[in-house]
Amino acid sequence: MATKVLVVDDERYIVKGIKFSLEQDGMDVDAAYDGEEAFRMIQEGEYDIIILDVMLPGMDGIEVCQQVREFSSVPILMLTARGEDMDKILGLEYGADDYMTKPFNILELKARIKAILRRSHGGEPRSNNSFEYHDLRIDFDSRRVFIKGAETNLTAKEFDLLELLCRNAGKVYSREKLLEIVWGADYPGDVRTVDVHVRRLREKIEPNPGDPLYIQTKWGVGYFFKS
């Protein structure tokens, strides 16, 4: 089955270019030109990844991303014409899996999309299929996480980060190492990305995010999963 992509941008020439390039790779691409239309399409359809511009008329991309995360963990790659770090961090804060700043190289965009899809669909074999600790249960094959039996939705990056830490429980990883392993050595962001994702993970899985049970901080060093 072809990869299903939704491209959301009010600049139609950008949508046209992305759509044409992804369709050349055999992907099935839908388009939306404002936030309300995009949100409706996401609610009604099933997509493998969403390419979402930040600056949209009406409901902006950040708001769309935030509302989508209320019911879906579909991978979201944000596009922004602005270069400030806070814009990038804000996109990640509300559940984006990655971001690119305009103007961008279409080949890099396609590489980012493929990397996100590999991670979200579980591109690497797993020898152990599940993990349980206190009220937390992780199914690695389906990439699903449960707290007290109730499923909680994680983004692809959040799951990758949690999987790495719990598979190596007790091992302390620096923020730089986590960025390199989970996001890749060529990722243009900085270690604040790791802090944002750890905070979001704690909010989703910890009984008390302010006093975490699972993901611990080794002050001055990094993070680890309590063994």
Image: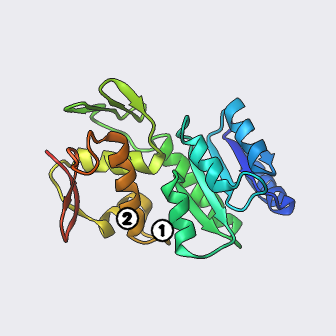
The residue drawn where x is 50% and y is 72% is 188
Image quarter where the C terminus lies is: top left
In this orientation, does residue 45 appear? no
Classify residue 5 by image quadrant.
top right
Residue at the (69%, 71%) spot, across then down: 81
Q: Which of 11 and 131 is in front in this view?
A: 11
Residue toward you, 194 or 57: 57
147 left or right of 99 in image: left
> Mark 2 touching mark 1, by CB under 8 A?
yes
Residue farthest to the bottom?
84
Against 119, is 196 above or below?
Answer: below
Asked which secondary structure carries label 1, the reply is loop
Would you call the spot at circle 1 few (<14 residues within 10 Å), some (14-19), or many (20 or more)?
few
Residue at mark 2 to residue at mark 1: CA–CA distance: 8 Å
Residue at image position (81%, 51%) is 33
Name the residue that disc number 2 marks: 179
Task: Find disc 1 in the rendering and name its residue.
Answer: 187
Which amino acid type is shown beneath numbered disc 1? Tyr
Residue 4 falls in image quadrant: top right
Residue 70 location (% of width, % of height): 54, 38
Residue situated in front as seen by the camera: 87 or 176: 87
Q: How crowded is mark 2: few (under 14 residues within 10 Å), some or many (20 or more)?
A: many
Q: Hey, which quadrant is residue 53 in on the image? A: bottom right
Helix, strand or loop status at disc 2: helix
Residue 132 image offset from top left, x and y in percent: 23, 31
In this rendering, does residue 187 appear at all? yes
Q: Residue at 49% of width from left, 43% of height from top?
A: 120
Vertical comparison of 102 with 32: above or below = below
Mark 2: amino acid? Leu
